[in-house]
Amino acid sequence: MSNQNDEQIIAQIVSGDVDAYKELYQRYASSVLGLSYRIVGNREQAEEIVQETFWRVWQNASSFNAHRGSITNWMFGIARNLSIDVIRKEKKVTMESLPDAHSEQAESSPHLKADHNVPEAAWSLLQQEQVLVALAELPTEQRNVVEWIYFQGKTRREIAQEFGIPFGTINTRAKLALQKLKRAFEGTGLAEEFRS
């Protein structure tokens, strides 16, 4: 089944194929986890969001419309919305209770600096999502290495030791993945983020 494209897998999920569902989960769970974790900043909550995202994919697979975007965009949209809901529920803070941007309390808070720019933060989140969509297009071995390095903070040597993969192989996979990501974002301002 691993040689099937995402659209074929979704069609099988619509017909109730559990193996197809497992395949989709194996392909994208770590990417969805990466996106969710970057938004909520809590591993346990991010893992719950992954479970809820894939549950919704299972429940609503028939509503997927390929003309409106890719499956990865659809899934990341679900995960992003769930993540934002978690943030909203946890941060029920009225505007009146927020300190003035120039107050001492704001100066000591990393999230409330005077130069805090909401549109810039939103753009950063959009860029992260675009990167995750591009990551999903990589071969599994390359995508895994990039996720281990950038989302889990592992060194290449740690990955080699932990998974019993030669260090040179890890280096090659990382380099190939970063080259592909750089090409994918050529001319967008994000290309320089992917130096190998």
Image (cartoon, rainbow, N blue to C red):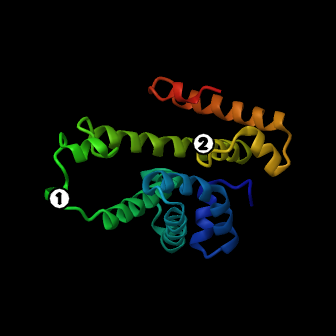
Query: Number of marks in the image?
Result: 2
What residue is pinned by disc 1? Answer: 97
Quick check: 131 above or below 6?
above
Q: Earlier in the sequence, mark 1 or mark 2?
A: 1
Residue at the location (53% across, 29% down)?
193
Q: Nearer the viewer, mark 1 or mark 2?
A: 1
x and y percent of residue 18 in the render?
A: 66, 74
Image quarter where the C terminus lies is: top right
Density class for disc 2 (Cα within 10 Å; few <14, some 14-19, many ≥20) is few
Q: Is residue 57 left or right of residue 95?
A: right
In the image, farthest residue toward the left? 96
Tell me, for residue 61, which label it has, or none: none
Q: Name the residue at 77% across, 39% down.
A: 157
Identified by mark 1, the residue type is Ser
Residue nearest the viewer, comparing 29 with 62: 29
Q: CA distance from mark 1 to mark 2?
A: 35 Å
In the image, which disc is placed on residue 150? 2
Secondary structure beneath dot 2 equals helix
Between 23 and 105, the one lying in front of the other is: 105
* For the residues bearing labels 1 and 2, Cβ distance under 8 angstroms: no
Residue at 63 percent across and 63 percent down: it is 25
Q: Residues within 10 Å of mark 1 (few under 14, many from 20)?
A: few
Rendered position, 119 above or below 188: below
Residue type for callout 2: Tyr
Which type of secondary structure does the marked residue at label 1 adopt?
A: helix
Point 70% across, 30% down: residue: 175
The quadrant of the rendering that contains the N terminus is bottom right
Task: List x then y, in percent, for residue 99.
Answer: 19, 50
In front of the other: 47 or 29: 47
Give x and y (percent) for residue 103: 18, 43
Q: Please tell me whether residue 24 is drawn above or below residue 145 in the rendered image.
A: below
Relative image position of residue 139 (x, y in whole percent):
70, 44
